[in-house]
Amino acid sequence: MASAQAHGVPTTPEGSITPATARAGIDLMVNGEAFRHTGDPQQPLLWYLRDTLRLTGTKYGGAHGENGADLVLVNDRLVPAITVPMAKLAHKHVTTVEGLASRDGSLHPLQQAFIDEDAIGCGYCTPGWLMAGVDLLRHKPNPGDTDIDQLTNTCRCGCQTRVRAAIKRAAASMAAHA
Amino acid sequence: MSHPTANGIQLSRRRFLQIIAGTAGALVVGVRMADAGEPPLPPQWLGDHFHELGAYVRIDQEGNVLVGARDPETGTGVATALPMIVADELDADWNRVSVVQLGLGVGAGDNGKPQWTYGRQRGGTGDSIPAAWGDLRQAGALARWLLTQAAARRLGVAADRLRCEAGTVIAPDGRRVTYGSLADDASKLDLPQQAPPVKTPDRYTLIGKPVGDVDAHAIVTGQAKYTIDHYEADELVAVLLHCPWPDGSLARIDTAPALAVKGVVKVMQLRPEPGQAPGQTVGAPAIAVLAENTWAALEGRAKLACDWNPGKATAADSTAFEQQANALLGGDAAPTTRVRDDGDVVKAGKRAARRLEATYYQPWLAHACPETMNCLAVIEQDHARLVVPTQAPQAAYAVVQRLTGLPPDKIEIRVPRVGGGYGRRLDHDYVAEAVLLAKAAGKPIRLLWTRDEDLTHDYYRSACVHKLGATLDRKRRIVGWTQRMASASALDGRGVPADHLWTSEVAANQLPAGLVPNCRSDWYALQSALPRGPYRAMPHLANAFAVESFLDEIAHASREDPLVTRMRLLGAPRNVPLGNGATLDVGRLRNVLQQVADRIGWKDWLRSVNGLGIACWHMDGAYVAHALEVSRQGEVLTIERAVCAVDVGRVVNPLGLQGQVAGATLDALSTAMNLAITCKDGKVQQRHWKDYPLANMAQLPNAVEVIVAGADRPPTGASFLAMPTAAPALANAIFRVSAVRVRRLPLMKEFLRLF
């Protein structure tokens, strides 16, 4: 796990002179860590994650996020990060692909299932598929094919059949450990 | 798998490889090294404790093995398969192997010319595995030979009495020495006079075993770094607004609103350099907005106010293009190139019992790489350092070298994992842009193309029209075949002689060449201002759709089972010479065809409520067949099953191969169903994913059943082998279930028109 905090924007760096006034900003949680965004409130979350926090697992796919490469969870709701301005994120909890594994590094069952099914082409869109799959498993712990058909992500490498298998494998694994 | 985890160490290892790679192994692989006479650089000088055993292998005292992957990984699996080939010959323990993605290997050669450290370096072009089979096995064998020699000295046993197993050298009396303890000694030995022999197949331990993608863990945790994920201190982000027309020019611009955006630093112009081939320079005039961060750059770009002077390229129009093709093929104009002319098609036509003809239309296509074009360029007075998402690092180098004038050893190009290639990244217009901007701005440039730029400024696959004709004798044998194809060559303007422009559009040896006594293939050149370039499975993708659809039409006209028609056309298993040294192994093609037929349940072809469709093809010594099953409920068609059989010779990584075959099948189906680029007034009309909608989950089959009909032959490439036959098998299945013959792609649009 990369330490997002290392790249974050600390309000008061340890050992520094306390500023006269704390910089105003938008407080949000990303993968369980607190951050304050002090830049343009209209900046989409995607560029905050990537350029500021250097959480680059969330990928740029297009202006509207239609292909799903930039899907993240905001308060457990699946959204393309490029469509969410920072202004809407005050006190929200954001989960990115970097936040799926546990702190000790143990993988989410769906991450493990992607490895086990080798559900990877070029891998660029994979984080988006994982976020969509995790969201699906949350709502449908035992998803059928028609449930999986609802995923709107696309993949030019053609990983869809392996992603489908990985989601089913993860569902089975989660049921076995429930 | 173990992976270097500490970033600092990984960086130094990578650098280590770039500096001294190839001092030994390259001799064996037949590439002369500029510094071959010099002793290897001491590892401690590089701040690392790995010992060098040839160009691609490093081993430390603990027995950790680094294996370099030379070809760019665009999703084809080479970063896994190439190191498997090396590691197998090395008899390494795969659990101790970490793969290092090698950047461009270049040093200073004679007369300032580049000296390639790793021979060829190219990905996604179908030749990575065959090339690796030719030299990477030897690279692994060389490392094993060095370790064995070192062990022989230490144990006092003749080298030929030692054997290697999973990172250990074992003596006849059972004494064992680990590679880790031998690496230092081995790295200091003189190289053999002759290349050490490679293994016989019965001794393979890795080749032929299923191995997962070496980057899988990094990818699923979001840690894998693509070029787009690289940042540089003091960088400026550059985003572009290209002129719609390659030969247009800037008429008016007001940069003030863009410059007023907080964080925007500069607005600059880019122009194509005259006299440079497509893909070697800027593709179209462009305005670049340079800013401190991506968001500011995008905001600045949105506020650009500019007008363009159109050039001649405004004439480009996809509808007019098709009309020109029709006019050309409808008349009796002589072809641009007669690609093939076996027997006498005219005479055969006169004697025919039956004549058939059909015309097929296929659209312009974009590459639509998941990772848009981007590049990180740091250009200093005496050094250039770039991170490039390229399929061809040596071609990228040529662009950088030309634009910087730097000597080869001062140009450093890293190639991290690449978010898709499909041929787009064999061109380097975006590299030229990044270098020009970095030079002009005097700052590191992180260039990022937005999706609309990526879709509207591609080097497209040309639309094409195929007019196919067949003559049958009284026994329904195909005795004459004419193919007349019109398209705009992908090679126009790329320094290719006029009589070779057809080579990107049609294969001289493609089906049914060699199987029909009178067989003619004509190519008609069309002009277009829309730029073209290499495309995945070109030229087979378009030709297989036309040929394999037409074979089905022939079968239908003959009231014959399409599998029988194909088997009769193929004839008995034998080797058919196709000219130019190429051979069609009919037995292998029959085999893949029969395998998919058996698996899909072809014996029910006539009775089945669902439609079954089949197609087969061969290219570059590899064989492929698809069988698809399509159901129909009202106007809803569903792909129920997809079966694909391939014969690629020896399989290096069966798991990787399965993924490639399934992936190419789905990509081809997605393309055939949904995708078309259209052009009006010289402007490409697809700007977003919604305009160029790759198939979603629901459109695609739930599984692709992959059959590997391997053989004990040298391996061929496989990454796009399964592209050409998927669409005709689908169209043929659709005909069975709907009685609608698809002669135009994309399919979905065609169906909306028909129903």
Image: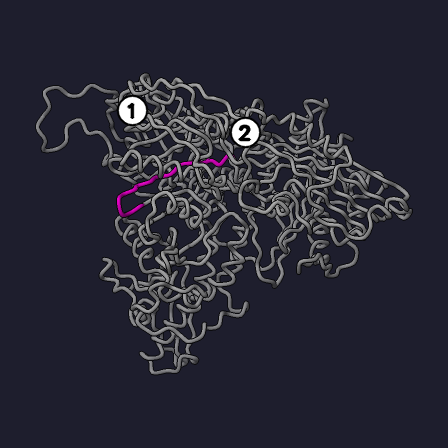
Tell me: B290 left or right of B677.
left
**Where does the N terminus of chain A fall, quadrant-wise?**
top left
Residue under pointer 2: A147
**Left or right of residue A28: residue B337:** right
- For the residue pair B178 and B549, the one nearer the viewer reads as B549
**Looking at the picture, how far across and down is residue B142, in whole percent?**
42, 69
Structural distance between the alpha carbons of marks 2 and 1: 45 Å
Q: Which of B252/B77 is in front?
A: B252
Vertical placement of residue B462 versus B717, above or below: above
Can the viewer see residue A99 in this picture?
no
The reply to whether the magenta stretch includes residue B373 is: yes
Residue B225 as seen in the image, left or right of residue B682: left
Q: Give A169 or B229, whichever is nearer the viewer.
A: B229
The residue lying at 41 percent from left, 44 percent from top is: B399
Callout 2: 10 Å neighbours few (<14), some, many (20+)?
Answer: few
Name the residue beneath numbered marker 1.
B264
Please, what secondary structure does the residue beneath circle 1 have? strand
Do we see residue B38 in this rendering?
Answer: yes
